[in-house]
Image: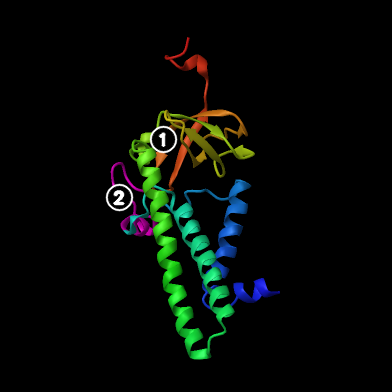
């Protein structure tokens, strides 16, 4: 009961509800219902990301999918504020001091969350310096991908693209002409729908690849 009191007390409660949303998002993402790049928007080749991804990049959190950065921010801020609340509750401060200390914990929680998330983003950018450009827009056209949802058709589907350095990303994909792909199949990305934020794919046939053989 003490845990729930702390989780839903100020300032932790400000992050508890978003944390529930984050957990729900990742559970549905693991089921293949939502895309990890859901909040990234669509940047043209070589262009800076817009929307929330652009805001996070401007704050020094670029290099990670927006959903990952936001999830880390919320989780770290929640944990820091929870620890801070437990500490000030243990001190038994008077109400005015409790309020002041809680506001201080809120500021510290945000700063710690931003600092740690920024450090992770910087680490990713340093470890994978060449992946940022290749993961944008039409640069994926011509690459193969592996279907990761139960199916891919003209209205639903996700696939995983693996890069030369071993890193990977999940993208929204669609077929045309009623073609149906199943989980585990290899597909070829042949077009980028910038407006829809997705890629058009078709079944990959090695026999038609001039590089094979």
Residue 4 appears at what percent x and percent y?
Answer: 66, 73
Q: Nearer the viewer, residue 79 or 62?
A: 79
Residue 52: which disc? none
Mark 2 Cα shell of 10 Å, populated few (<14), some (14-19), many (≥20): few
Does dot 1 land on a helix, a strand or a loop? strand
Q: Which residues are magenta?
A: 41-58
Q: Position of residue 72 (x, y in %)?
A: 49, 57
Left or right, 100 with reference to 28: left
Q: Is the C-beta separation of discs 2 and 1 under 8 Å?
A: no
How far apart are the alpha carbons under marks 2 and 1? 21 Å
Q: Residue furthest top?
A: 213
Q: Residue at 48% x, 79% y: name it.
A: 102
Q: Can residue 43 be seen?
A: yes
Quadrant where the N terminus lies?
bottom right
Residue pushed farthest front? Answer: 91
In the displayed structure, 145 sits above or below 35; it is: above
Looking at the rendered image, the disc whose residue lies closer to the viewer, 2 or 1, is 2
Q: Residue at x 55, y 80 (%)?
A: 91
Identify the mark at residue 191; answer none if there is no mark: 1
Which residue is the site of mark 2? 48
Question: Above or below — where is 47 with respect to 108?
Answer: above
Q: Judge the density around disc 1: few (<14), some (14-19), many (≥20) Cα neighbours within 10 Å.
A: some
Residue 172 is situated, as x and y percent measured from the top left of the image, at 50, 43
Q: Residue 144 at x, y = what percent?
A: 47, 28
Q: Helix, strand, or loop for circle 2?
A: loop
Residue extending furthest right? 1
């Amino acid at each position: 009961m003490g845990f729930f009191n702390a989780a839903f007390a100020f300032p932790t409660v400000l992050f508890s509800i978003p944390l529930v949303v984050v957990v729900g998002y990742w559970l549905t993402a693991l089921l293949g219902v939502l895309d990890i790049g859901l909040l990234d928007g669509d940047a043209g080749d070589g262009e800076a990301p817009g929307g929330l991804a652009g805001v996070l990049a401007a704050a020094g959190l670029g290099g990670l999918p927006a959903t990952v950065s936001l999830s880390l921010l919320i989780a770290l801020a929640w944990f820091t504020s929870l620890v801070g609340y437990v500490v000030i509750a243990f001190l038994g401060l008077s109400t005015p001091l409790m309020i002041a200390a809680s506001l201080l914990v809120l500021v510290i929680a945000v700063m710690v969350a931003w600092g740690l998330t920024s450090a992770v983003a910087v680490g990713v950018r340093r470890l994978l310096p060449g992946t940022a450009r290749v993961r944008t827009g039409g640069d994926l056209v011509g690459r193969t991908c592996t279907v990761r949802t139960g199916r891919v058709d003209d209205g639903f589907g996700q696939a995983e693209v693996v890069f030369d350095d071993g890193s990977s990303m999940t993208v929204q994909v669609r077929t045309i002409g009623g073609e149906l792909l199943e989980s585990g199949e290899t597909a070829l990305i042949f077009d980028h729908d910038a407006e829809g934020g997705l890629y058009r794919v078709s079944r990959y046939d090695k026999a038609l690849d001039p590089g094979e053989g």
